Amino acid sequence: MLLGVNIDHVATLRNARGTIYPSPVQAALLAETAGADLITMHLREDRRHIKDADVAAVRAAIQTRLNLEMALTDEMLAHALSVQPHDVCIVPEKRQEITTEGGLDVIAHFEKVALFTQQLTQNHIRVSLFIDPDKTQIQAAKDAGASVIELHTGAYADASHEKERQMELEKIQQATQWAASLGLIIHAGHGLNIHNVADIAKIDAIEELNIGHALIAQSIFIGLPESIKQMKNVIFQARCGRMGIL
């Protein structure tokens, strides 16, 4: 299972004081050295953390893959086509939200999603759609031409009690089975940390997790390389246990 490290909140800390540090580029390179399989960044409309120059600088510096999260807007499409990240993940976005609150409604925006997917794909950028674990949205993602979906794990991560958590986990498991039957590549992310990631990592068809806030938060206490290594170890143990290796 691949681990994408989201470095948005390194930029959040930098912007809090208007300095040039900590550097997202330095964070990306450090993450790669510590075992990150790709670097994820979300260039939001209000530029609250990552800036345009950050995306270009990280794209030029890293040796792995850049996964650019972006809203379904013409501005962001033009930016992605200019920067040429390896992957684009189209996400919903509202200025008033603290973080992404749910999955993209592919059905409601089907024509625009299909158009963006076509243009990005024609420019050799792989397209992922960040959606809720819902069969109708998964089918719409497939119909829109996306080759990858990223399942929103927020409801699972934020569950207030075990029964609710298990219910949300089952939704993700069923959604994963459905998506795999359609031939989609499946990623997952949002709200995952070392305490809740194992059950998601055990789902065979999920190939990649994108995690940010928990890694950056933990890095304050133990450093970014150790935070990434700790996360990868939890994922590895869960994955191996699922396969009967351990």
Image (cartoon, grey):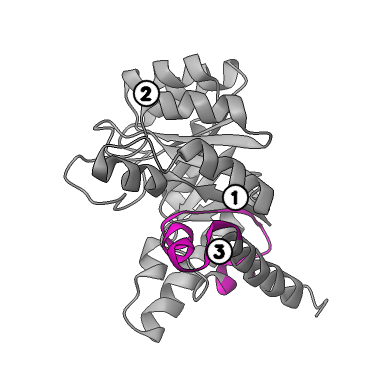
Query: Start and end of the magenta stretch?
Result: 198-225
Residue 136 in picture, x, y percent from top left = 43, 49
Q: Tell us which disc is closer to us: 2 or 1.
A: 2
Quarter occupied by residue 220: bottom left
| Placement of 10 over or under 122, stated as above or below | below
Position of residue 191 in the picture relative to residue 222 (left or right):
left
How crowded pointer 3 is (Cα within 10 Å; few <14, some 14-19, many 20+) is rated as many
Disc 2 from disc 1: Cα separation: 23 Å
Disc 3 and disc 1 in contact, CB within 8 angstroms: no
Disc 3 from disc 1: Cα separation: 24 Å
| Placement of 159 over or under 126, stated as above or below | below
Quadrant containing the C terminus is: bottom right
Q: Tell us which disc is closer to us: 3 or 1.
A: 3
Position of residue 205 in the picture relative to residue 52 (left or right):
right
Name the residue beneath numbered marker 1: 186
Disc 3 from disc 2: Cα separation: 31 Å
Q: Mark 3: which secondary structure? A: helix
How crowded pointer 1 is (Cα within 10 Å; few <14, some 14-19, many 20+) is rated as many
* Three-letter residue code for mark 3: Ser
Which residue is located at x 55 percent, y 66 percent?
173
Disc 2 and disc 1 in contact, CB within 8 angstroms: no
